[in-house]
Amino acid sequence: MSTSALLFAVKRSKLPLPPGPRKLPIVGNLFDVPETLQWETYARWSKEYNSSIIHLDLAGKSMIVINSRDAAESLLEKRSSIYSDREDFPMVNDLTGWDFVFGDEWRIQRRLFEQSFSVNASSKLEPQQCLASGDLLKWMLSDPEDCIEHFKQMTGEFVMSLAYGIDVQPSNDPYVTLAHDAIGTLGIAAIPGRYLVDSFPILKHVPSWFPGAGFKWQAHEWRKLARGMMELPFAETKRQMELGIARSSFTSDNLDVLKDADAGQAFFQERHVVSTAGTMYVGATHTTVSTLATFILAMLASPEAQKKAQLEIDAVTGGEALPTFQDRDSLPYISAIVKEVLRWKNAAPFAVPHRLTVEDEYLGYRLPAGSIVIGNAWALLHDESVYPDPHAFKPERFLLSGQLNPAIPDPEAAFGFGRRMCPGRHAATSSIWIAVAYMLATFDIQKAVDSDGQIIEPTYEYVSGLVNTPVPFKCSIKPRSPQAIALIRASGSQ
Ligand code: HEM
């Protein structure tokens, strides 16, 4: 190292860490991390310490939380070459077997994804998205009580078809159930500070029977789900390919490429197809289900928004057809509802944690190499200087004179940051847009009433995790008219 570089390094390492709560010896802030709603606590600390970035010490593991748009842009976007790794959490990667999602091969996975989910490639998915939303309407008509289950089924159907070309069963499909159970466990395992083994990796060698080693037994059970959700549908697609009955899908198309490519010519191998298809499922399902469930809650919170949206759709379709993707420009209020749903109670409040690979400096603070870096998407999407009255559901905030207002930032942080930003965001936004437009065209969504005729107020509570999902709630979903019933019956694939 040259003398000037050495002097610079010494100077840098003397810079203070960003502010944060007082650190105890050894455990640091491990016990300051709340069990739930961490993002709200981090946003509050950011205000209390008057700093857009805060620092925590999780028993020796440095963690930085970014709470403003400026800081997220400067670090996660502009310096994304050093802010884009994932943390190697022993609980997630070694013990529960999720290394296929959080491992080192993410660059190859993203190249494979981007081929399938660029804006252009995503628009090819529209016919499939319309069919999936049509099926959703039918299930909601026949069983209006259980819309969250229908959202799971719809998303499962869409992703299984896209990733593996597998048709799922109309209910209780084993692949969809397995994937949902598996991803549910990931949501718990992947929260920074939740498991001591992430701060003290040596604990992963403790035997399962050892007092306090319940996490090992739990990880053992969870691992079966994680590996099963990745391996079983892939094996089924391969079996169908051998029989010559496989449909075109992400998996079969890419395996065909490998078969045709001369050895070593393709930039990926079979194991990348397996892990990318599995990651696709993980990325797509809980997030989309949570966002659609939030849409229903939003309609309960704001009957006025629902009425305006229905009037807008009726003016375009005359109530005689379902809206289509071609109507998008004529339905700005629907687009504003989708943006507001993504913002209001964003599904992944702190996206997925990133990792800083080399030491960095920001606003006079030292950001240590190896830090876990959390982009607090919730804080950015509830910043009152950008979105006034941020806790209210107000699609109008995205509109000016009845059209989408380009001056109001899109809720992009809902899809994460920089090079790790969700590669499925275009597909996700259009899936949600068409499902929302179909539901509003055909159903009235209202608060449920109990046997005494009293309105049941939803709690608007969420189960906290990497992906937040609404606690099951009651609502009343009724077709808007006999004409709407006829439209529902004529839609979908089944
Ligand atoms: C409303 C629906 C969705 C939301 C809110 C959402 C949100 C996110 C977020 C916050 C991340 C982490 C970004 C980061 O690390 O900064 C992510 C990653 C990812 N998402 Fe999505 N997502 C959605 C739908 C989808 C869909 C439909 C797909 C695929 C078809 C998908 C595939 C992925 C993948 C593969 C990753 C991992 C990317 C990586 O690690 O580099 N997502 N998503």
Image (cartoon, grey):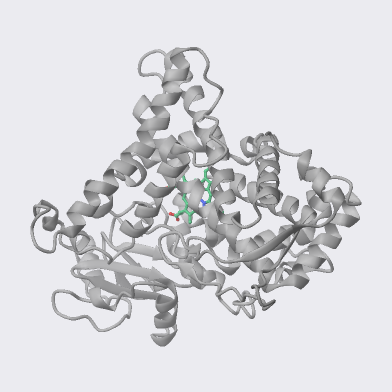
Apparent side of residue 1 relative to residue 209 in the rendered image (left or right): right
* Left or right side of 311 for 280: left
- Residue 60 location in percent, x, y? 18, 68
Q: Which residue is rendered at x = 34% and y = 59% of the image? A: 188
Q: Is residue 387 above or below residue 121?
A: below
Which residue lies at the image location 41% right of the left edge and 38% below the top edge?
Answer: 278
Which of 468/297 is in front?
A: 297
Residue occupying image coordinates x 47% and y 47%: 283
Q: Which residue is depicted at the point 64% across and 36% down? A: 125
Q: Quadrant of residue 401?
A: bottom right
Q: Which quadrant of the figure has residue 467?
A: bottom left
Count of marks placed on residues: 0
Query: Relative to 391, is 158 above or below?
Result: above
Q: Position of residue 477 (x, y in %)?
A: 70, 60
Question: In the image as oriented, which residue stretches furthest toward the front?
Answer: 451
Q: Is residue 429 left or right of residue 7?
A: right
Q: Residue furthest bottom?
A: 48
Residue 130 position by quadrant: top right
The reply to whether residue 349 is visible in this rendering is yes
Residue nearest the observer in this picture, 166 or 39: 166
User: Residue 141 or 325: which is nearer the viewer?
Assistant: 141
Coordinates of residue 30 in the picture (x, y in percent): 24, 73
Position of residue 223 relative to residue 18, above or below, is above
Does residue 115 show up? no
Name the image quarter holding the C terminus: top right
Query: x and y percent of residue 386 in the render?
Result: 62, 74
The N terminus appears in which quarter of the rendering? Answer: bottom left
The correct choice, above or below, for 221 with respect to 332 in the image is above
